[in-house]
Amino acid sequence: MAYIKRAQVKQKTEDLPSGSAIAAAWPDHGEIILCGTREEACEVSNPYASEHLQVIAEDLDWWKEYLRNFGSLFMGEVSNQKRYE
């Protein structure tokens, strides 16, 4: 599974304007962590205290309750997209 995800990251970076910066940073700073449960995912995520954390999952209220350390929390599939009125 991690090999598949790594291939997806590589493909996505090639499609982005900042792809070369991502590709340069990935070997030293990128990682993929697979968790078996959402509780385990929170145990892994909370110590990292990510500046930007995006959750795409069901039961977003549960995640909001158990994720504690982050700068900004983006919830849902389109939470990282700009919205114009």
Image (cartoon, rainbow, N blue to C red):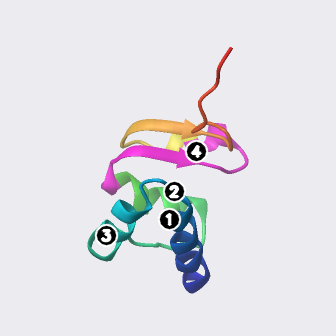
Tell me the residue that label 2 is attached to.
16
Cα gap from disc 3 to disc 2, whole angstroms: 13 Å
Residue 15: quarter of image: bottom right
Check disc 3 and give the amino acid type. Answer: Ala
> Given this view, does label 4 or label 1 mark the residue nearer the observer?
1
Cα gap from disc 4 to disc 3, whole angstroms: 31 Å
Q: Position of residue 77 (x, y in %)?
A: 68, 44
Check disc 2 and give the amino acid type. Answer: Leu
- Tag 4–tag 2 contact (CB < 8 Å): no
Q: Position of residue 1 (x, y in %)?
A: 61, 83
Quadrant into which the C terminus falls: top right
Check disc 1 and give the amino acid type. Answer: Thr
- Tag 1–tag 2 contact (CB < 8 Å): yes
Quick one: SS at disc 1?
Answer: helix
Please tell me which residue is depicted at 32% across the width and 77% down the height of the picture.
Answer: 27
Residue 30: quarter of image: bottom left
Please tell me which residue is depicted at 65% across the width and 49% down the height of the picture.
Answer: 56
Q: Position of residue 13 (x, y in %)?
A: 50, 65
- Tag 4–tag 3 contact (CB < 8 Å): no
Label of residue 24 in the image:
3
Please tell me which residue is depicted at 64% across the width and 25% down the height of the picture.
Answer: 83
Q: Are there few (<14), some (14-19), or many (20+) residues within 10 Å of tag 4? A: some
Residue 60 falls inside the magenta stretch: yes
Q: Earlier in the sequence, mark 4 or mark 3?
A: 3
Q: Are there few (<14), some (14-19), or many (20+) residues within 10 Å of tag 3? A: few
Cα gap from disc 1 to disc 2, whole angstroms: 5 Å
Tell me the residue that label 1 is attached to.
13
Q: Is residue 69 left or right of residue 8?
A: left
Residue 76 falls inside the magenta stretch: no
Label of residue 63 in the image:
4
Cα gap from disc 4 to disc 2, whole angstroms: 28 Å
